[in-house]
Amino acid sequence: MRDTLGREITYLRISLTDRCNLRCVYCMPPEGVNKREHRAILSLEEMEEIAREAAALGVRKIRLTGGEPLVRRGMLSLCRRLRDIPQLEELTLTTNGVLLPGMAAALKAAGVDRVNISLDTLDPEKYRCVTRTGTLEDALAGIRAAGEAGLTPLKLNCVLIGGFNDDEIPALAALTAREPVEVRFIELMPIGGAAPFGPEAYLPCEAVLERLPELEPLGETGGVAERFRLPGAAGTVGLIRPLSGCFCGRCDRIRLTADGCLKPCLHSREEIPLRGLHGADLRRALGRAILHKPAWHGELSAQVRSEAARDMNQIGG
């Protein structure tokens, strides 16, 4: 289905939970989130029903997010049910990777095609700092497990934070030299928990091109990402510019929060409650949300924060 601007909406991101086993500084508060009653979030059956109606309207790709999706009980069962949707072409997942050593093979068997894994640094102390609780070795073990299970091509998400990990841009990009992975540098967004960062933290992706002038543009996009390659590298480098650029014109996604609200745009205050709707009523609500998807996410900068009223862990990144 197309919106009023002619954009074809084919991509649904479903947040399975707002809980996480890490506490990344740009995503959620240090104390985590208040534990909610199970009935406060969508059941797996409700998520499946919404996904099926979205597929009937043209959604062909679903990504499971969080919080950390792997902490949601029963998520493998949901994966199997989503994979059975006839129109679905791709089922993916974004994770911090910590639980992948024990789950990667099961995820592949349940129908997950590939995963994106958060990796903001290659320094063990900095990793503990940015995640507040995690260990780098656990994340690296998860990356290895994903590759061995065939959850590929792997994409590694790195949030650029000026004064924190910008000195690691060459080392992170070098991960693509021998492995067919994509390292994606993502500009820090002034949303929720990320809002308290100082201006120097909001580093534009242009810094990557300045540090790595040898990057060769591929002349294609990976969704919202601009893609490049180091000379002779097996993998690619992606740049995602929510602040310094504008990819709204090619945005093809909508988001479902764990408590049942549809967000046509990550940075908009607009949320459409879907819980309790079924059949034709649910399809009409989805259709209206797609049709009236905002033209752009509004101005974002170190001084202008997102209009979104939630932290990233509550939306699904």
Image (tube, rainbow, N blue to C red):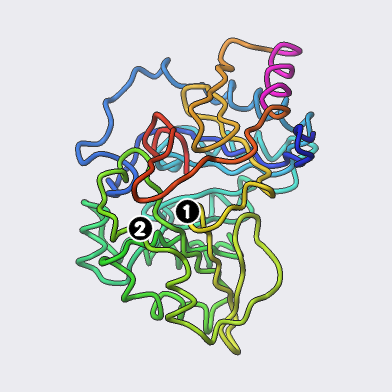
Tell me residue 133's x, y (percent): 22, 51
Q: Which secondary structure, mark 1?
A: loop
Tell me residue 307's x, y (percent): 44, 33
Q: Is residue 127 above or below residue 62?
A: below
Q: Main secondary structure of the magenta part?
A: helix
Q: Is residue 29 above or below residue 26?
A: above
Q: Is residue 312 above or below residue 290?
A: below
Q: Which residues are magenta?
A: 279-289
Alpha-carbon neighbours of circle 1 within 10 Å: few (<14), some, or many (≥20)? many
Identify the residue shown where x is 65% and y is 33%: 81
Residue of label 1: 243
Q: Is residue 269 left or right of residue 81?
A: left
Q: Amino acid at mark 2?
A: Tyr
Q: Which secondary structure, mark 2?
A: loop
Tell me residue 183's x, y (percent): 50, 68
Whether 295 is among the magenta residues is no
Identify the residue shown where x is 55% and y is 67%: 238
- The residues tagged by marks 1 and 2 sit, at their Cα atoms, a distance apart of 9 Å
Q: Earlier in the sequence, mark 1 or mark 2?
A: 2
Q: Amino acid at mark 1?
A: Leu
Q: Is residue 215 left or right of residue 193?
A: right
Mark 1–mark 2 contact, CB under 8 Å? Answer: yes
Tell me residue 113's x, y (percent): 64, 54
Q: Is residue 315 above or below residue 38?
A: below
Looking at the image, which is closer to me, 302 or 284?
302
Residue 67, quarter of picture:
top left
Numbered circle sitting on residue 28: none
Direction bottom: furthest residue:
232
Residue of label 2: 202
User: Which quadrant, please, contains the N terminus?
Assistant: top right
Q: How many marks?
A: 2
Identify the residue shown where x is 20% and y is 36%: 31
